[in-house]
Amino acid sequence: MLSQLKLYNFIFFAALIVLFSGCGGASPGETDDVTPLSQDVPVGSATMPQATALPVEPPPETSPEPTPTPEPAAPAQESSDTPVVTFSISGGIVGFCDELRIEADGSYTLESLCDQKVITGGLDQTDQEMLQAWRENFEGFQISSEDNPGGPDNMVTNLNFNGQGDTAADEQQQTMIYEWINGLTLRLRTQQSEASAPAQAPAPPDEPSVEVTASSAICPEIGRPALLTIDVETPERLVLIDPDSQVSCEIALNQPPAGRIVTAAGQIYYPVLDTEAQILSVLQLKAVGEEVPLAFTDVSTAEAGPFNFTISNDGAKIAWAQTQVDFEAEPPLYRNSLWLANTDGSNQVTLLDQAENDELRFVIPVRFSEDGSRLYYTLQPDLGGFGLSGRLDNLYSVPVSGGEAQLIYSCPSEENLMCIGGFSPDGAFLTVLEPAEDALQIIDQSGGLINTIPLPATDYVERTAFGPNGDLAFVTATLLETGEDQPPLPNPGYLTYLARPYTGEAQTLLSDNSVGTLWGWLDESRLIFGQLDQAGQAMTALLSLDGQVTALTPNVVVGVMR
């Protein structure tokens, strides 16, 4: 059985990663949607009140919730030449104008109607099998969605699914298919943009070749992806490190970060504290090197309580949260506030306004969906240190325009706190800790059990880090108590890996006393973790899927610049 005492009291390195990075949120590549699980998934009781949005600025004349609205099912008896999927997306901040068609054999065509560019290819085996199962089981249906009807940058999506089965997909199943197709479109669109980008001129022969992209104006001499790190003794200076050449570049900040650091679209975001005014807010370091205070995120620190924030992948949206705690109440009363806006300060929305919680829970915005249409957040139990394992508890989803929050999964409050290890990049899978079995379960959106992974150790079980391609990894450890004033150390620690579609046997990539906490993925084949020496001192290191370890720096990693 899991030791609750040891579970929340691990090494100091883990505390630093949670403080300065987003271990409670998305790791590199962990940025896609999550779709609500079906009603037959066991959940605990959620005591949060309905999260009805309170617009800060006057909303458009009409602002219906952008949740995809199922329309009457299309006849299943269609020609075999009809695509299984026809999906279009237009408008939005980035100006989508794309149409995706997927045939029964898995071949697809993505056409950008604006610039007449076309990308073709075929689904991988896992995606093809999933789509084929949906097609054979479900009747056809259509879904249409708008995220800001009548307003600026309205994004419109239309899906026609040509199912051949005799079962009508319910709303959650339709939403699952919609989210998967929407995410696929965005991934293919990114590939199309990269493929059509002009080639970089080669560097002169006497100079090292450095990849410079539009997002690399911060330290352009450092190739991407690069590790963004911090020395806790000099927190006003960040260091960007090329993991291959180990060339580094120092980034000076105006003042030390007062919490987690987030990277998005080649920019850096971090909270700063004005001690005289008792104001905490987020500051943006732009790719061109300019630091811009996001004054609209100001919150008062007159009352103690956690502050957190997250940024969408494209850097267009920010969500930030504050919890104020009334310690004079019995039990202490937690008042949670959650806000959302574009990073330029427009379209501000209040999602939670001093929502009272008497279960000692505080709100954390976890991440945005890949298309930026939804925000995922959690109500975490205050266990001291704010949960160093990085796992989640009581996970919710809400449209960015506001509306009623939807419970995705809730952990039993007493039996299995913070049981959610994480969710996959495409949002199709969750990992859930099962202490009674000393195992980690992988479930799909309908609540079906995909696999059960026996835990190599149970004193400490960390969050699940999903890679860009959906592969997962996590750290467990048997802990050795080293003294009353010293944190326990792994003896040993295990770094476990499982490839998508998660039906195989998990592999132990590394197992010894050097395995510290796992930060996340650098790319599809390398993991970032804290490596401990015999004295318990930590180094940031890389671990390849073939077991090769590369020590990089004693600094703490806080992000990946791409």
Image (cartoon, rainbow, N blue to C red):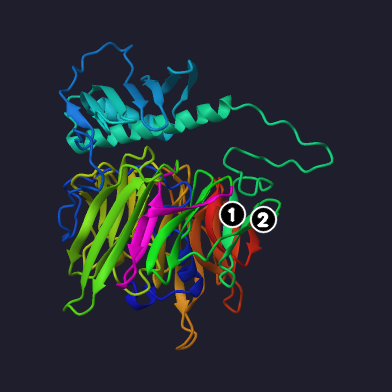
Residue 17 in view, yes or no: yes
Query: At which x and y percent is residue 223?
Result: 65, 45
Q: Position of residue 493 (x, y in %)?
A: 50, 69
The residue that mark 1 highlights is 227
Residues 338 and 175: in front is 338
Q: Position of residue 161 (x, y in %)?
A: 27, 23
Residue 152 falls left or right of residue 330: right
User: Amino acid under label 1?
Assistant: Leu
Rendered-image quadrant of the C terminus? top right
Residue lying at 23% horizontally and 41% vertically, measured from the top left: 58
> What numbered label is drawn on residue 175?
none
Residue 278 lies in magenta, yes or no? no
Q: Is residue 246 above or below residue 539?
A: above
Badge 2 amino acid:
Cys
> Which quadrant is home to the N terminus?
bottom left
Tag of residue 249? 2
Q: Which residues are magenta?
A: 289-313
**Callout 2: SS:** strand
Between residue 447 and residue 199, name the one nearer to us: 199
Tell me where residue 16 appears, x and y as whole percent.
49, 69
* Magenta stretch, main secondary structure class: strand
Residue 414 seen in the figure: no
Measuring 39% from the left and 29% from the top, which residue is drawn there? 128
Q: Name the secondary structure under disc 1.
A: strand
| Front residue of this view, candidates 154 and 546 | 154
Tag nearer the camera, 2 or 1:
2
Q: Residue at x 64, y 55 (%)?
A: 241
- The residues bearing labels 2 and 1 have C-alpha atoms spaced at a distance of 10 Å
Q: Residues within 10 Å of mark 2 (few under 14, many from 20)?
A: some
Q: In the displayed structure, would residue 136 be above or below residue 239?
A: above
